[in-house]
Amino acid sequence: MQELIEKIRREHQEVAQLLSDSETLRDPKKLASLGKRKNELNIILERVEHLSAIEKNMRDNAELTRATDSDPELKSLAMEENIQMAEEKKVLENALKQLLLPRDPNDDKDVIVEIRGGAGGDESSLFAAELFRMYSRLAEKQNWHIQTLHSNQTEVGGFKEVVFEINRGRGHMPVYQKMKYESGVHRV
């Protein structure tokens, strides 16, 4: 993992150099992609630095607990702090592993969802309306934006068909990344 982190540090330096290059400043697409990559690398490096700080504090606390001339109360506080930091370290390592996984290039995209009531008349249209409300609430919780593109409502309050776009707001979780496995036929 240390080799991978060093590789990321080198890439961060290269990207920073390219961003300061006058040729890059003339190409808006390249500038945007390099800026995005630099932000991704910044997030990874922040987590790495936080992880290093936790490991250093844990080593310092371990030395304190091994010292024979330390106050017993101080030793117990150091051990408690190490337990808390070990849990935080585990969470941080898992988050870092996820950041280091190769990314799907489509993860940053928005989605268009189509829901159609199938055979079954009013019940299927009511089920389609329930699915639409479910996805609407999910979007609301994730701070995503929904825009209805087309809908065909029934007399009972259901949908024969509803087509809507979900896009994310700034700084929120990508829509496609979360919803890429939401496909197929739902039956009652």
Image: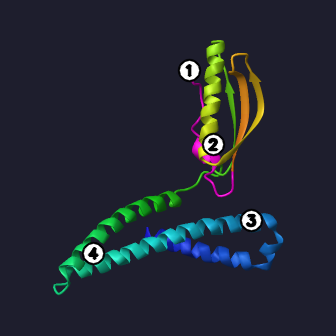
Instruction: Give the left or right position of residue 47, taking residue 58 as reference.
Output: right
Q: Nearer the viewer, residue 102 or 92?
A: 92
Q: At 20% across and 80% down in the image, what residue appears?
A: 66
62 lies above or below 158: below
> x%, y% of residue 11?
60, 72
Marks 4 and 3: CB-CB under 8 Å? no
- What is the crowding at mark 1: few (fewer than 14 residues within 10 Å), some, or many (at least 20)? few
How far apart marks 1 and 2 lie (CA) works out to 22 Å
> x%, y% of residue 120?
63, 12
Magenta span: chief secondary structure: loop
Q: Which residue is mark 1?
A: 187
Q: At 62% across and 36% down in the image, what residue appears?
A: 135
Any mark on residue 78, and which?
4
- First in residue order: circle 1 vs circle 2: 2
Q: Secondary structure at mark 3?
A: helix
**Magenta stretch: residue 101 in it?**
no
Marks 1 and 2: CB-CB under 8 Å? no
Quarter of the image for the C terminus: give it: top right
Q: Which residue is mark 3?
A: 32
Task: Give the amino acid at mark 4.
Answer: Ala
Q: At 55% across and 75% down in the image, what residue appears?
A: 9
